[in-house]
Image: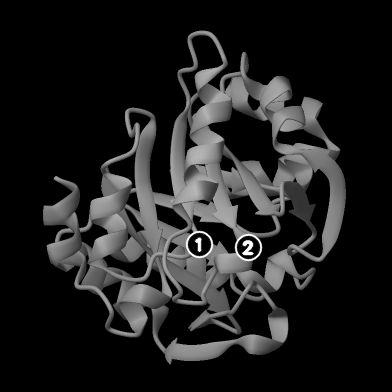
Amino acid sequence: MQIIPAIDLKDNKCVRLSKGKDNTSVVYNEDPEKQAIHFEQIGCKKLHLVDLDAAFGRSNVNFETIKKIRKSISIPIQLGGGVRSLDLAKKYFEVGINNLIIGSMSIEKPNEVIILSNIYTEKVYVSLDILEDNIMIKGWDKNSGKKIQDVLDIYTNSKIKGYVITDIQNDGMLKGLNLDFVSNFINKINLIKKFNKKIIIAGGLTDYSDLTNLKKLDTKNIEGIISGKSFYEGKIDLVEAQKILN
């Protein structure tokens, strides 16, 4: 299991939000490229990159910065936020993004996401942004009307790599990882025969105890957990966090 550091881009700066709300952004680094290099230098094996502007409908604000980050580091990058067309998805893959995390499009246009995952096998994650078992879309502002099981039923036999599950209520709040949220999802996938997708957890990581408690769960499908505000607020050291997960 990996600790995966996050860079959330807004106006080409590294920021964090609370509960994903656009008006709660706090700038943590004016130079996200340097931040990405730092993560690679301390030994992180993957970077979680989010284009917040694109998620909220402001396209192309951060694209050049995303390209700079891709060129400045060699570790894999998983990118989410505003990927709502096949053309944009292909554009990101062409500039070297390793994995795409797709939310709204995976709910509204599942056939297109399945086509994309057939072309780019094991490179697409479906983003499950969850608020009280409801799947939220459009920058977490709109209830899709779908439940977790509805989406699992669509993608279980597809060639996506897995799911990034976000506990919206807990995201950026530093109140501790909601283990019931994680357990609930694990219980759902354990009911699926031969479930072979990866899971990445987002939202709520606060300190080392969260990692210790997470390891007590059935973690065979969990690829990693994302660290955002817990790192930027100095609550955890990423090197120490990875030692715990190892």
Q: Amino acid at mark 2?
A: Ile
Q: Amino acid at mark 1?
A: Gly
Query: Are circles 1 and 2 on residues that touch, CB within 8 Å?
Result: yes
Q: Nearer the viewer, residue 135 or 217?
A: 217
Q: What crowding class fits label 1: few (fewer than 14 Cα within 10 Å), some (14-19), or many (20 or more)?
A: many
Residue in the picture at 32% in, 60% down:
210
Residue in the picture at 50% in, 21% down:
190
Q: Is residue 82 above or below residue 53?
A: above
Q: Position of residue 199 (x, y in %)?
A: 46, 37
Circle count: 2
Q: How is the image coloured?
A: one colour
Q: Is residue 128 above or below residue 118?
A: below
Q: Is residue 237 above or below residue 115?
A: below
Answer yes or no: is residue 223 visible: yes
Residue in the picture at 66% in, 23% down:
155
Q: Position of residue 245 (x, y in %)?
A: 19, 49
Q: Position of residue 3 (x, y in %)?
A: 28, 55
Residue picked out by circle 1: 203
Q: Nearer the viewer, residue 102 or 142?
A: 142
The furthest residue to the top: 193
Answer yes or no: is residue 94 visible: no
Q: Determine the image quadrant of residue 226.
A: bottom left
Report the quarter where the C terminus lies: top left
Residue picked out by circle 2: 168
Q: Is residue 245 left or right of residue 27?
A: left
Q: CA distance from mark 1 to mark 2?
A: 6 Å
Q: Is residue 17 left or right of residue 85?
A: left
